[in-house]
Amino acid sequence: MVRKPVVSTISSGGYLQGNVNGKLPSLGGKEPPGQEKVVLKKKITLLRGISIIIGTIIGAGIFISPKGVLQNTGSVGMSLIIWTVCGVLSLFGALSYAELGTSIKKSGGHYTYILEVFGPLPAFVRVWVELLIIRPAATAVISLAFGRYILEPFFIQCEIPELAIKLITAVGITVVMVLNSMSVSWSARIQIFLTFCKLTAILIIIVPGVMQLIKGQTHHFKDAFSGRDASIMGLPLAFYYGMYAYAGWFYLNFVTEEVENPEKNIPLAICISMAIVTVGYVLTNVAYFTTISAEELLLSNAVAVTFSERLLGNFSLAVPIFVALSCFGSMNGGVFAVSRLFYVASREGHLPEILSMIHVRKHTPLPAVIVLHPLTMIMLFSGDLYSLLNFLSFARWLFIGLAVAGLIYLRYKRPDMHRPFKVPLFIPALFSFTCLFMVALSLYSDPFSTGIGFIITLTGVPAYYLFIIWDKKPKWFRRMSDGITRTLQIILEVVPEEDCRKL
């Protein structure tokens, strides 16, 4: 059920002037003189698209703890193979999303594709879990890494106080939210800068590592496949850690409607980004092993810092700063993209209508951006975020697997659908199978955590029938809802988007 906006614009006196179609008042069928259409503009160029993908994928993981892959493979050689294979699998998923994004030219990513193929209930459950738990918790976790590493140079000789980390983290989250609320262009420009910082950080590790190889420091690669044999349960878990490190290739599809020439730029941005990230990740791991043994890597909680302390001397102090900037870029890219998911879900009637409104001057989805702020702050100060993410990590791969499986369904259900970019069918088939296999494995290997996540996900079903399907809500509830919407609209200076998208 798609709700129509109750209000549409704010007059100069601050009063709401509404019509049920959600359009600005017209003068003889034309736009009022000097009135600019209130829409999300196409400001994502190819370079900005690449920066969104790379800037969101490369967070803290590759610098801090690649030991999850090594732990579950048992050898240096097998861990490098897993990193490569996970990059190829992620590329397969990204190419599948490139076809979906150029065929269904709507923002929203997973949510939009699941809605298109499987209907409103699974799509609502996806956005329900994303809004309440996954995105606030994920943002809080990467933000905590930002807070810890930005403070590291100031607490060399002692432990960083947890309160200090959380306070600087809260400031970082707030800055990201304000930035994304104020300007799409500035957010994208800063993302480009931060992407270059991430690549610089990787090069700081790769270049000394290559120099070590040239000097003959290859003893950690001798008998690379010797060591503890990987178990049948270990290899799939290693894939899980690897795929988690590559997660983020799907974020450009969240902002499809803001991409210039999406039929060309989305596939190009995805292919270029995934090639850079995969090569960078594999070479970074190779560089680690030129200086750190497998046993030492497993004992380190911050591999990049351990590596830099041994090889770079005083310059190693720069590494935590670059890691912090890398985390900030992931925070910025994630908020920028996921706010569009909430915006689209609201436009479809699955979230409160205020989230589908746009600032009258800045042309940003202001409510959809700031809704994350209080939820993220609650997560930040509430306790063990990593356990919470473990409960719900299976949901991400379940819905991504479903979305890619939907591509195969659309091939047969709608063969005449316009597809400017088309991938061989084995690519989505292999990727969706891998995702669903990881989900099934998590149910077997960790039934407690996965079961809790499954229960939390299922709460979206009664919520769907209560908030979306049930039409006979009390009048007092409707009046209160409309009043809150009007009040927020005045305070935030937002209006519904002009219905002028050519989809």
Image (cartoon, grey):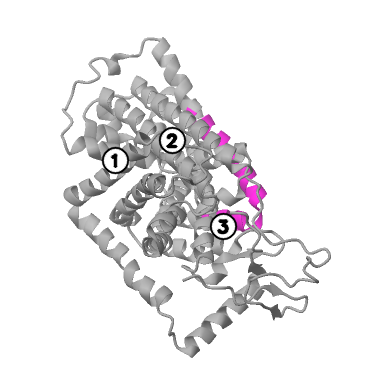
Residue 321 visible in the picture: no
Q: Which residue is mark 3?
A: 177
Q: Which residues are magenta?
A: 173-202
How many other residues sit within 10 Å of disc 3, few (<14), some (14-19) or many (≥20)? Answer: many
Report x, y in % for residue 443. Answer: 20, 52
Image quarter for residue 448? bottom left
What residue type is disc 3 on?
A: Met
Q: Residue at the front extreme?
A: 416
Report x, y in % for residue 425. Answer: 37, 36
Q: Are marks 1 and 3 in contact (CB under 8 Å)?
A: no
Residue 119 visible in the picture: yes
What residue type is disc 2 on?
A: Val
Q: Which mark is residue 434?
A: 1
> Is 425 displayed left or right of 332 in the figure?
left
| Label 1, label 3: how far apart the Cα atoms are | 34 Å
Q: Which mark is residue 423?
A: 2
**Secondary structure of the residue carrying numbered label 1:** helix
Q: Are marks 3 and 2 in contact (CB under 8 Å)?
A: no
> Is 243 displayed left or right of 334 in the figure?
left
